[in-house]
Image (cartoon, rainbow, N blue to C red):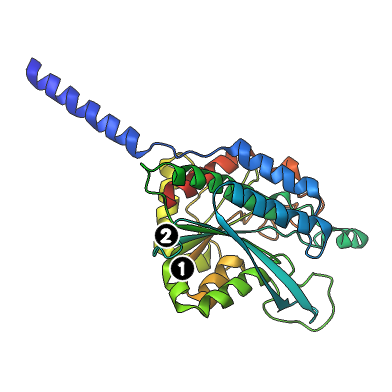
Amino acid sequence: MTVLLAVLAGMLGACTKSTQAQEQRPAFSADSAYRHIERQVNMGPRVPDTKAHTECILYLLNRLDAYGAVSECQQGTMTAYDGREQHVINVIGHFGKPDAKGRILLGAHYDSRPWCDEEELYDDRFIAVPGANDGASGVGVLLEIARQLGLAAADTTIDAPAVDIVFFDCEDMGTPSFYTGAEREHTWCLGSQLWADETAKDPDMKKRFQYGIVLDMVGAPDAVFPKEYYSMQTAGGYVEKIWRNANRLGHGKFFVHSKTGPITDDHYYVNAIAGIPCLDIIHYNRLTGTGFPFWWHTQHDDMTNISTETLQAVGETVMKTIK
């Protein structure tokens, strides 16, 4: 009996160690992500064709280079909501072998909305959104992931994943609510439309991508991330995998198992145009009128709405998934 108990104890100990190893938290610093967000907000709203926008581009390129990525700017023009030609600049960092297959796309938009068109007072609607959560939060998480990818690439004992990080431009240039002109289609997500158009023209590049993850509004203290409709339609298996990882890491209060209707975001165009399965991790709450936080597209989208706990949950979950 003593021998049997000892064997059982050994087996239980081995199982416990195995479980602990399986659920080991990936390296990710929410404090680092927070500082990247704060840095962007301090630049001012990153509205396209402004000084702050240019400063942000240079900052992104500098950080990607420092973390060992092969960086580039993808430029082009897209038609804005009012019919004018809008200059678009996507910032891209490549990690891993350039010709590696099974690449993972990680994306977030870095631009800020030019108008606070959800403000109650009409005159306030023409002020640019600070964009702490709506834009900078996803960028901050991806910059910290870029740092971790750089560290992994330097460690020859680790099989680092092949990842493209794309900071999309002009996501938030969609038709403002106060606009009274002729309606146009596809006025949101101009940067991802440009990226997807260029990728679709190159069959070899298109085939290299396994799937994509877009981060949008991932910093709020009370954030909840349901399973978005388009994500489930085009990348349902990856959605389930990510949400399982989140729950195993103890982040179930953020990654909830409810579902949303379709949300137009960068992930939609990555799939619809380039044909790459892509999903959206986005804050959506049915209890608000818009489905987004009450300070969405207002002057109050500032650093008071950024939580390191939420950043840690998102960062750890994405890192565990791509590794």
Residue at the image point whose x is 71% and y is 77% from the top: 78
Task: Give the Cα distance between marks 1 and 2.
Answer: 9 Å
Q: Quadrant of residue 176?
A: bottom right
How packed mark 2 is, by other alpha carbons closer than 10 Å (few <14, some 14-19, many 20 or more), is some
Question: Between residues 273 and 264, which one lies in front from this camera angle?
Answer: 273
Give the left or right position of residue 208, taking residue 178 as reference: left
Tag 2: amino acid: Tyr
On the image, the x and y values in percent for residue 47 come to 79, 61
Q: Is residue 251 above or below residue 118?
A: above
Q: Is residue 219 above or below residue 180?
A: above
- Residue under numbered circle 1: 277
Q: Is residue 133 above or below residue 272?
A: above
- Residue under numbered circle 2: 238
Give the left or right position of residue 98, taking residue 192 as reference: left
Residue at the image point whose x is 39% and y is 63% from the top: 102
On the image, the x and y values in percent for residue 257 come to 47, 53
Of helix, strand and loop, which one carries label 2? helix
Which quadrant is the N terminus positioned in? top left
Give the left or right position of residue 124, taking residue 196 as reference: right
Question: Between residues 295 and 22, which one lies in front from this camera angle?
Answer: 22
